[in-house]
Amino acid sequence: MALAGKVALVTGGAQGIGRAAVQSLLQSSAKVAVLDLNKTCGEQCKAQLDAEFGEGQCTFIQCDVSNGDALRDAFQTTMDKFGRLDIVINNAGINNEKNWEKTIQVNLTSVIKGTYLALEHMSKEYGKEGGTIINVSSMAAFLHSPHQPVYTATKHGVIGFTRAMADASITGDYGVRINVLCPAFVDTPLLQTVEQEDNMGKFFKFKDDFKRSMDKFGILQ
């Protein structure tokens, strides 16, 4: 896909893998809506990107993706700002085994909602021109570590949901390419949460097992 003139929306876009995706999109001349819950981080990210790529190429929208109304509003704000939407990257994620309901809301439910909202703005079924959706899962979906069972379940869910939606897009002629990305261990703020007992709860005691997996597969910078 030629990206010049295209518009992308990236959740969790102010840091980590999301920030890298935003950077790559801007380097390819796309315009980008950066969604993130962290306002300070998001504003700093936008200032840095404005300095590198020029003002008007990206916009920051503070958004709690677990809030369906806020997510819908963010999509509409993107449309109001740029006039179109071609690419959606559902990347936002957390790793909190103690508050596991929130982990499901952010890691899986928001991906489902983000995909459906993306289709409303891109699918031929809605009279649009098509586009691309990338849902971010994780290699953790295949490792079933005792350290993070709910996180693992959410990432399994993202894979299954995305595969089913890709088939739906083909069968329904949506004109939307829907893919899932499964990164390995990447040195991001999310990865650092495995060291926090407040996040991992009763599974914190299994962190050494998880660290052995990181040692085996390595950590990308």
Image (spheres, rainbow, N blue to C red):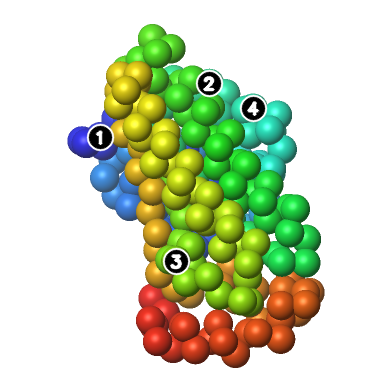
Counting from the top left corner in percent of width and height, residue 30 is at: 33, 38
Which residue is disc 1 drawn over?
4
Q: Contact (CB < 8 A) between labels 3 and 2?
A: no
SS assignment at label 4? helix
Q: Residues within 10 Å of mark 1 (few under 14, many from 20)?
A: few
As measured in the structure, the alpha-carbon distance from the residue carrying label 3 to the one carrying label 4 is 34 Å
Counting from the top left corner in percent of width and height, residue 211 is at: 53, 86
Q: Residue at x 44, y 88 (%)?
A: 215
Q: Contact (CB < 8 A) between labels 1 and 4?
A: no
Q: Is residue 202 left or right of residue 126?
A: right
Q: Is 185 above or below relative to 79? A: below
Looking at the picture, which amino acid does disc 1 mark?
Ala
Which residue is disc 3 drawn over?
142
Looking at the picture, which amino acid does disc 4 mark?
Asp
Looking at the picture, which amino acid does disc 2 mark?
Asp
Q: Residue at x 73, y 53 (%)?
A: 102
Which residue is disc 4 drawn over?
73
Viewer-nearest of labels 3 and 4? 3
Counting from the top left corner in percent of width and height, residue 139 is at: 43, 66
Residue 122 seen in the figure: yes
SS assignment at label 1? loop
As measured in the structure, the alpha-carbon distance from the residue carrying label 3 to the one carrying label 2 is 39 Å
Q: Which mark sits nearer the N-terminus, 3 or 1? A: 1
Which residue is disc 2 drawn over?
80
**Where is residue 197, by image quadrant?**
bottom right
